[in-house]
Image (cartoon, rainbow, N blue to C red):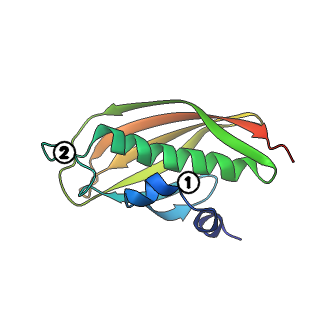
Amino acid sequence: MTGLEWATHRGMGALAEKMGIEFTEFTVERAVATMPVEGNTQPVGLLHGGAYVVLGESLGSMAANLHAGPGRLAVGIDINATHTRSATSGFVTGVCTPVHLGRTMTVHEIAVSDEQGRRCSTIRITNLIKTVDA
């Protein structure tokens, strides 16, 4: 099963689905997803900062779980975001790459860009990997 098939089979969770997040590429080395601006905005029409973070956490946590493998679960323990531009229409794309892939911890960086390729937000998430009780 490919990483994208695994992610599709596992599902992204109800929040990511409600926000319209769609995975387009998914491996341990690189995960990519898109999200519409429409429906995820602040009252003034800008993509909500929390929406960037949901996209980043969806990508980073899922990538960490793919790395963790069967019988183990990655859970987020820290996330931060720096917003540098505001998307107002179309779609944004998040590209998730690992900074550290350890036995018990992962760190991923997610760069979110608008349709013109301009970076709008940079998110870093740390996940703890634990064994799932049988």
Determine the CA span between mark 1 and mark 2.
27 Å
Q: Is residue 108 left or right of residue 94?
A: right
Q: Is residue 32 left or right of residue 51?
A: right
Residue 26, percent from left and from top? 57, 60
Residue flagged by tag 1: what amino acid is it? Answer: Arg
In the image shown, does 37 or 102 lie closer to the viewer? 37
Q: Which residue is mark 2?
A: 46
Query: Residue 98 occupies which quadrant of the picture?
Result: top right
The secondary structure type at the circle numbered 1 is loop
- Earlier in the chain: of badge 1 and badge 2, it is 1
At 54% across and 45% down in the image, what residue appears? 60
Say which residue appears at 19% left-offset and 45% top-offset.
46
x%, y% of residue 42? 20, 43
Disc number for residue 97: none
* Relative image position of residue 1 (x, y in whole percent): 71, 71
Task: Decide if residue 28 is on the left or right side of residue 19.
Answer: right
In the displayed structure, would residue 118 be above or below residue 79? below
Label 1 CA crowd tier, 10 Å (few <14, some 14–19, many 20+) = some
Residue 30 numbered tag: 1
Q: Residue furthest right?
A: 134
Q: Nearer the viewer, residue 15 or 116?
A: 15
Indicate the amino acid at tag 2.
Leu
Looking at the image, residue 4 lies above or below residue 117: below
